[in-house]
Image (cartoon, grey):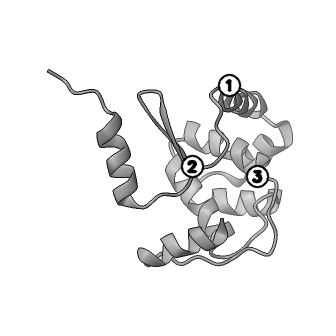
Amino acid sequence: MMIHLKNVASQIDLPLNTPSKAYNTRLAQEMGKWAEEQGKGDEFHCAVFQSYFIKTQDISSSLVLIDIAESIGLSGEEARNTIKNRTFREEVDADWSYSHEIKVTAVPTFFVNQKKLSGAQPYEVLKKFILDNHIQKR
């Protein structure tokens, strides 16, 4: 998987390092929900991606996640409380349940009209998938 991801990244000049370890991303997912609620979801997800795939940081660490939150202008204190209280646990549980229900087995997974395409894909593959599966409007 990392070889494929590195190949795709190199095609678009995206810096990408190989982390030495895969970390449990559960807290990062919960913090992502919090950041989305704060209107900073995209910034948070991009910062987590950079922390893991470029800086090879441990994104399961509360301290790393708090630093990420602060780096995008979110409150470190609110981030600490969100982690401590596991405020978004139920929302992430619901996301996981839904993912199992619709049989998501890889990230990313794309859906168009009940058709599924899994994994990082080149632009042309995504374009063909969308064009082949969209409903024509009359």
State the quadrant of the N terminus. Answer: bottom right
Distance from disc 2 to disc 1, alpha carbons, whole Å, reads: 16 Å
Which element carries disc 2, helix, strand or loop? loop
The residue nearer to you, when weighing 118 against 53, is: 118
**Image quarter for residue 112?**
top left
- Rendered residue at 57%/74% (across/down): 6
Q: Nearer the viewer, residue 27 or 113?
A: 113
Indicate which disc, 3 or 2, sits on the residue closer to the N terminus: 3
Q: Is residue 74 above or below residue 103?
A: below
Which residue position holds label 1?
Answer: 101
Q: Where is residue 32 in the image (x, y as percent from the top left)?
A: 64, 45
Q: Judge from the rendering whether residue 54 lies leftward or rightward of residue 135; answer left or right.
A: right
First reached walking from the N terminus: tag 1 or tag 3: 3
Please tell me which residue is depicted at 65% across the width and 69% down the height of the picture: 2
Judged by depth in the image, the label closer to the viewer, 1 or 3, is: 1
Whole-percent x and y of residue 102? Answer: 62, 28
| Residue under pointer 2 | 108
Residue 73 at least partly seen: no
Do callouts 3 and 2 mark residues in contact (Cβ within 8 Å)?
no
- Kindly identify which numbered label has been placed on residue 25: 3
Question: Residue 3 falls in which quadrant of the image?
Answer: bottom right
